[in-house]
Image (spheres, rainbow, N blue to C red):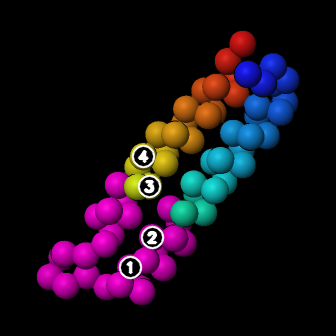
């Protein structure tokens, strides 16, 4: 377990930035590379992965600010 709070905050910030990097341009790139056909396509899975990634990123943020 990492005891240094500033190191934990840096780790949480990096995880959050990676998650935002996936969610903002990543989903747009996936949608442009593999477009949907009548509403069926990979964006549902990509959004689900983004949701799980957001939960993990939020967990890292909570871990970083805990005592």
The x and y percentages for residue 58 are 54, 36
Q: From the viewer's perspective, is 43 left or right of 50? A: left
Nearer-N-terminus badge (2/4): 2
Q: In what quadrant of the picture does the C terminus appear?
A: top right
Q: Which mark is residue 27?
A: 2
Nearer-N-terminus badge (3/1): 1
Q: CA distance from mark 4 to mark 3?
A: 5 Å
Q: Residue at x 35, y 55 (%)?
A: 48
Q: Is residue 40 above or below residue 65?
A: below
Q: From the viewer's perspective, is 12 left or right of 5? A: left
Q: From the viewer's perspective, is 48 left or right of 50? A: left
- Badge 2 density bin: few <14, some 14–19, many ≥20, Cα 10 Å: some
* Farthest-out residue, front: 1
State which region is magenta: 23-48
Instruction: Kindly identify which residue carries mark 1.
Output: 31
Q: Are marks 3 and 1 in contact (CB under 8 Å)?
A: no
Q: Are marks 4 and 3 in contact (CB under 8 Å)?
A: yes
Q: Residue at x 29, y 64 (%)?
A: 44
Q: Are marks 1 and 2 in contact (CB under 8 Å)?
A: yes
Majority secondary structure in the magenta region: helix
Q: Which mark is residue 50?
A: 3
Instruction: Kindly identify which residue carries mark 4.
Output: 52
Q: Residue at x 33, y 70 (%)?
A: 43
Q: From the viewer's perspective, is 37 left or right of 13? A: left
């Amino acid at each position: 377990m990492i005891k240094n709070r500033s190191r934990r905050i840096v780790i949480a910030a990096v995880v959050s930035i990676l998650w935002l990097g996936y969610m903002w341009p990543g989903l747009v790139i996936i949608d442009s590379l593999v477009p949907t056909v009548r509403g069926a396509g990979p964006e549902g899975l990509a959004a689900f992965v983004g949701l799980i990634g957001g939960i993990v990123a939020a967990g890292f943020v909570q871990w970083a600010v805990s005592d």
